[in-house]
Image (cartoon, rainbow, N blue to C red):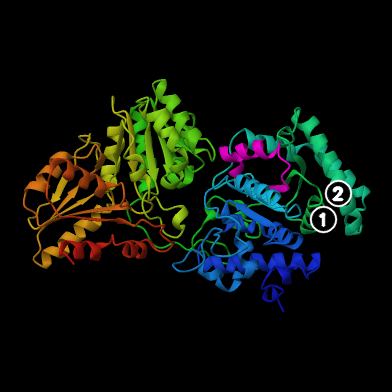
């Protein structure tokens, strides 16, 4: 009988021996691979943390002891063994489990973590609260991995925690990769530790002295911390030539140890929980462990979609005549523009494959930069480049841009610097849910002075907006576009400069006017065609620019006698296109009935994009109903 069938909660887990935990780890990998092959999710990250997850829940008294995962896509094993195994096939599906830890989903999810680099701050807050409440025995553990330690917030939290007396453990899951390969000085620092010949010689020597594989576990574990301290000293002095970074910040550092040796993990964690104050355990794991294809290609298998569970081969649908994705159009277009304009450079915070800047990195490696999970730095780095005459295209996912809001205001817009900020994944993104929906960018950015904001309806407009943005004297420009497929297979149009702040009428009509911005305009056009079949004449305007907004179109719409005006956007209604139209009509004294369609004043769940568009009332039927006054 498989062990996993009997693990319904962590109490069942704690009845097992360490040998049984090893067998359970193998079963969990098989279960995750089998499930995700048919129900796509984040595969490679969770395969790399199976043993660690089991050891943590085995040693610590969760959920009373607090465990925070950073980033949350490492936490699939955590979900399975904390009472959600029977629901696991619903992960990232409409009405099913979230792909990330979620506080209202389980008491074991101590903190929601869809974005990276937040765990140490959160766990320090929890540890401080426990002290203030008189609970000095509770343990607080942050598991930070997949490149999250490169995020600035993680360093801020380490700096604060290191001088505290917080009872906390930071587990650094070092797998050398985020979604793409990890970059930067910290990654090199960790590599020097793990690759130190002195450290590895000492590790083998001490292991043999303790009896090697033949020694009793209790004997090895009784001496393991002394070994770790000595190994750290050797790595610090011989390999690094400088103090260990984490010890310099005030943490007691232990490791590195094998993150797939569950026996060693259980022993070390058991002893670490007896040591007070801030501690950091450095473990080394293999992202994608247990599936050869994922181990060899963790970037592709981070979230591979459907695949054959036996062979690992991805199952891809036929896309011979399909349009390129918006992000791919961006990747090809920036290369073409950079060939014409030597001032252009590309920047991304740890998402080169996702945003397709990897294409430029391959062809122009000196002019394309992955700065790690560091959106604030990415924007100000771009500002510095612009201040010296370069034209940076800084590509950031819309929901990740939220962490760089001050930099857009203070470092870019205020100084009138020509930075082009491309917001990928704008609007509803689907299965990743509320942490990743690009819902707020238009409402957040529209109030900022000296900022141009635009959104393409199709890939031709994306290319033209990118071309226009890099022309002289354009200032700071934001271009937002959605995840997924664009419109036309013939995406490679000739560049054309757009008149900034000007929209276009794409369909004439007399009864209602539909004003859209961005890709959602394709739904508006479809709705107008359906309305025509029902004898309702609808005009459709692609506004293109949210800021500056085309007041000539607004004046014409307000004075042409339309029965009603409908605005539609794939961002929150409050503060976006609809708000801008209503503000202008009020300022001009126009008495025009306006229906605003957009995302509600609520966080939108995860699920298929079409379903979420329907739920939010921004699909074709919703537009048709609004046009008919229903």
Q: How many marks on residues?
A: 2
Q: Is residue 361 above or below residue 266?
A: above
- Residue 231: x and y in percent read 83, 40
Q: Name the residue under label 2.
A: 224
Query: Residue 232 versus residue 630: which sits nearer the camera?
Result: 630
Q: Are marks 2 and 1 in contact (CB under 8 Å)?
A: yes
Query: Residue 18 versus residue 151: which sits nearer the camera?
Result: 151
Quadrant of the image occupied by residue 545: top left
The answer to whether residue 308 shows anywhere in this view is no
Magenta span includes 387? no
Element under disc 2: helix
The answer to whether residue 521 shows anywhere in this view is yes
Q: Is residue 247 left or right of residue 595?
A: right
- Residue 404: x and y in percent read 46, 38
Q: Mark 1 points at which residue?
A: 267
Residue at left 54%, top 59%? Answer: 102
Element under disc 1: helix
Report the quarter where the C terminus lies: bottom left
Q: Which of marks 2 and 1 is nearer the N terminus?
A: 2
Report the quarter where the N terminus lies: bottom right
- Residue 34: x and y in percent read 58, 69
- Residue 315: x and y in percent read 48, 63
Residue at left 68%, top 48%? Answer: 132
Q: Is residue 39 above or below residue 196?
A: below
Magenta span includes 149? yes
Per the rendered image, the range of residues in magenta is 148-173
Query: Residue 198 versus residue 450: which sits nearer the camera?
Result: 450
Q: Which label number is shown at residue 196? A: none
Q: Which residue lies furthest to the front in this view?
A: 133
């Amino acid at each position: 009988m498989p062990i996993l069938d009997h693990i319904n909660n962590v109490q069942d887990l704690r009845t097992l021996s360490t040998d049984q935990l090893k067998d359970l780890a193998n079963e969990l990998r098989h279960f995750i691979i089998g499930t995700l092959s048919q129900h796509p999710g984040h595969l490679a990250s969770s395969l790399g943390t199976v043993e660690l997850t089991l050891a943590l829940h085995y040693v610590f008294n969760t959920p009373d002891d607090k465990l925070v995962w950073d980033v949350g896509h490492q936490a699939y094993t955590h979900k399975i063994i904390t009472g959600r195994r029977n629901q696991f096939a619903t992960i990232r599906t409409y009405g099913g489990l979230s792909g990330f830890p979620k506080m209202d989903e389980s008491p074991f999810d101590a903190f929601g973590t869809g974005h990276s680099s937040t765990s140490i701050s959160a766990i320090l807050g929890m540890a401080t609260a426990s002290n203030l409440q008189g609970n000095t025995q509770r343990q607080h553990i942050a598991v930070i991995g997949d490149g999250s330690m490169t995020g600035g917030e993680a360093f801020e939290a380490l700096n604060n925690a290191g001088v505290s007396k917080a009872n906390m453990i930071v587990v650094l899951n070092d797998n050398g990769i985020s979604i793409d390969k990890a970059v930067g000085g910290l990654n090199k620092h960790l590599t020097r530790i793990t690759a130190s010949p002195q450290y590895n010689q000492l590790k083998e020597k001490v292991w043999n002295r303790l009896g090697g594989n033949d020694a009793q576990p209790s004997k090895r574990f009784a001496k393991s911390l002394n070994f770790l301290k000595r190994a750290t000293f050797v790595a610090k002095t011989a390999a690094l030539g400088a103090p260990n970074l984490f010890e310099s910040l005030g943490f007691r550092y232990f490791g590195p140890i094998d993150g797939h040796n569950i026996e060693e993990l259980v022993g070390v964690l058991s002893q670490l929980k007896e040591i007070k104050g801030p501690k950091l355990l450095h473990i080394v794991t293999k992202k994608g462990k247990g599936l050869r294809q994922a181990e060899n290609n963790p970037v592709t298998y981070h979230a591979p979609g459907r695949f054959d569970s036996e062979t690992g081969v991805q199952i891809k649908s036929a896309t011979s005549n399909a349009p390129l994705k918006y992000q791919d159009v961006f990747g090809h277009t920036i290369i073409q523009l950079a060939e014409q304009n030597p001032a252009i450079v590309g920047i991304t915070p740890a998402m080169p494959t996702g945003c397709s800047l990897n294409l430029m990195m391959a062809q122009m490696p000196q002019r394309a930069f992955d700065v790690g999970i560091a959106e604030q730095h990415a924007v100000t780095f771009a500002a510095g480049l612009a201040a010296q005459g370069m034209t940076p295209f800084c590509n950031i996912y819309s929901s990740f841009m939220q962490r760089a809001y001050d930099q857009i205001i203070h470092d870019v817009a205020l100084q009138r610097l020509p930075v082009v900020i491309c917001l990928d994944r704008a609007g509803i993104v689907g299965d990743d849910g509320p942490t990743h929906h690009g819902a707020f960018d238009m409402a957040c950015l529209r109030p900022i002075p000296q900022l141009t904001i635009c959104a393409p309806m199709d890939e031709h407009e994306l290319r033209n907006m990118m071309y226009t943005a890099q022309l002289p004297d354009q200032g700071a420009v934001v271009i937002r576009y959605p995840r997924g497929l664009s419109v036309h297979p013939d995406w490679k149009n000739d560049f054309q400069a757009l008149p900034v702040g000007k929209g276009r009428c794409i369909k004439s009509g007399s009864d209602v006017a539909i004003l859209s911005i961005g890709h959602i305009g394709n739904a508006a056009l479809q709705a107008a065609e359906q309305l025509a079949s029902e004898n309702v004449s609808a005009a459709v305007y692609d506004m293109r620019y949210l800021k500056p907004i085309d007041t000539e179109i607004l004046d014409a719409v307000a004075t042409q006698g339309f029965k009603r005006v409908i605005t539609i956007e794939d961002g929150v209604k409050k503060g976006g296109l609809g708000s801008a139209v209503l503000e202008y009509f009020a300022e001009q004294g126009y008495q025009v009935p306006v229906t605003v369609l957009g995302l509600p004043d609520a966080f939108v769940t995860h699920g298929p994009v079409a379903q979420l568009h329907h739920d939010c009332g921004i699909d074709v039927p919703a537009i048709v109903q609004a046009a008919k006054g229903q």
